[in-house]
Amino acid sequence: MDEEKQSSSSNVDADDHTEDLDTTTEAENDYLTDGSDDVEWIGPSNWDEPPKSSENDQIPLIPIDYTSVVEAAQNFIAVFEARYGPSPPFFQGSLQDAIAVAFGELSSPILERRPLAIYLHNDYAVASHLFAQSVMCRDDISSLLKGQFILWGWDMTYKENRQKLYEWLATENLMEVAGNLQSVHSSKYPVLVILLKDRNTIMPFTIIKGHDNAENALQKLMMSLDTFMRVKHDEAADDQKRIEREQIRQEQAEEYEKALAADRAKREEEAKKLELEREEELKHQQAKEKRKLRQAELASSLPEEPAENEKDVVSIRLRLPDGMQNTRRFRTNDSVQCLVNFVGSLGFVEDEYSIWTSDFPKKDVTSLDDLSKTFMELNWPHKEVVTIDKK
C-alpha cells in the first residue's frame, strides 16, 4: 500500500487500503490445492518448514499439541514475553471471541469498538525476532495496541497451526483475509494484519510485514485507527438516526394505540349506555305491562256499578293527581276494598297513592285497619269526595 496516501472516504475501501497486500510475486501466490472445490488451507508451497533436526531448537510460541485455544494463547504470551520482554496484552481466547470483543458483537456500544490486530509469528523468518522486539515491544506501539486495538496472536511456524488458523478464518467468513495471507511468503513474517468492521462487513485494512520498520508500522496503525474512527462515527450517527426513527415510530405507534384505545373505550361506553337505556326501557315496559295487568285484574275484581236510581248506594267523586275527576257508585254493602281497587284500576295503586277522605281530620282509606268492612259498617256518607295523592 502507498503509505503516504490516505483514503478520504469514511468507509473502508479495500482497493485503497490493501495495496501492499497484493505486492507479492507470482511465486509467492503459488498455493497448494487438491484441484477440487474444497480448498485445504495449508499455505504457500514454498513456505519454509521448520528443520527436522534439533538445530536451533527453542520452545515454540504455540506447540502443535496444545489442548485448548486458551492454553495455546497463554503459552504464546508466556513464551513471547520470555523471549522479547514486556509486550502489548494479547487477547487470551479464540479468534472468534477476539472478533466479538473487538467489533462489539457482545453488545458493546459502537464507539467502543476497536480494530482487530492479528499478529502472526514465524520462528524461522529472518525478521521474526527483530520485528517482535523493535516493533511489537516498542513503547509507543505497544501502548497504542494496548489502548486502541484488540491484539490476538498466533504462531504460524508449524503447518498444523497454520491449518487451524485458516479453518477459523473460513468459519468466520474471512476468506479475503485468508487469501491475503496466502500472498505473503513465509520469509516476510511476522505480519500484523489490521481488520476493520464497516457496517456488517469485516475486512482487512492493511498488513504490516516483518520488513516494515517501527515508523512505518506506527504510521499504518495510526492510519487504520483514523479510518476506523471515521467508520465508527458514521455508523454511530446512522445508528442514532435509526434509534430516533424507531423512537418516532414507537411514539407514533403508542399514540395510535392510545387513539384506538380511546375510540374503543368511547364505543364501549356508548354501547354500555345504550345497553343500560335498553335495560331501563325494558324495565319500564315490563313495569308498565305489569301495571296494566294489575289494573285489569283490579278492574275485573270490581262489583258491577249500581244504577243511579238504585237505593243503598254511595257515590264517590275522585280528585285525581293529574287534575282530572272521576265518579264511581258502590252499594253500601260493598267493602271499602272495592274503592281501593277501583282507584288502583285507574293506575293509582295503594302502595304508591293515598286516598284521602273529606273528613276533618282527613283519613287515608288505604291505611284503615280492615278494608274488608263495608261502607255501611263504616257509616260512609252517601256522597263523598276523596282526593288521590302520591304517597
Image (tube, helix red, strand yellow):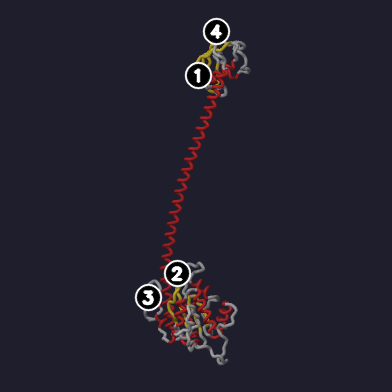
Q: Residue at x 54, y 82 (%)?
A: 161
Mark 3 or 2, nearer chain start: 3
Badge 2: how crowded within 10 Å, few (<14), some, or many (20+)?
Answer: few
Q: Position of residue 236 (x, y in %)?
A: 43, 66
Q: How far apart are labels 1 and 4 at the CA level?
A: 26 Å
Badge 4: how crowded within 10 Å, few (<14), some, or many (20+)?
Answer: few
Look at label 1 and name its amino acid.
Answer: Leu
4 vs 3, front mark:
4
3 vs 2, front mark:
2
- Checking the image for residue 199, the label placed there is none
Look at label 4 and name its amino acid.
Answer: Glu
Instruction: Locate the C terminus and report the quarter of the image it occupies.
Output: top right
Look at label 2 and name its amino acid.
Answer: Asn
Q: How far apart are labels 2 and 1 at the CA level?
A: 93 Å
Q: Residue at x 50, y 79 (%)?
A: 166
What residue is disc 1 on? 320
Look at label 3 and name its amino acid.
Answer: Ser
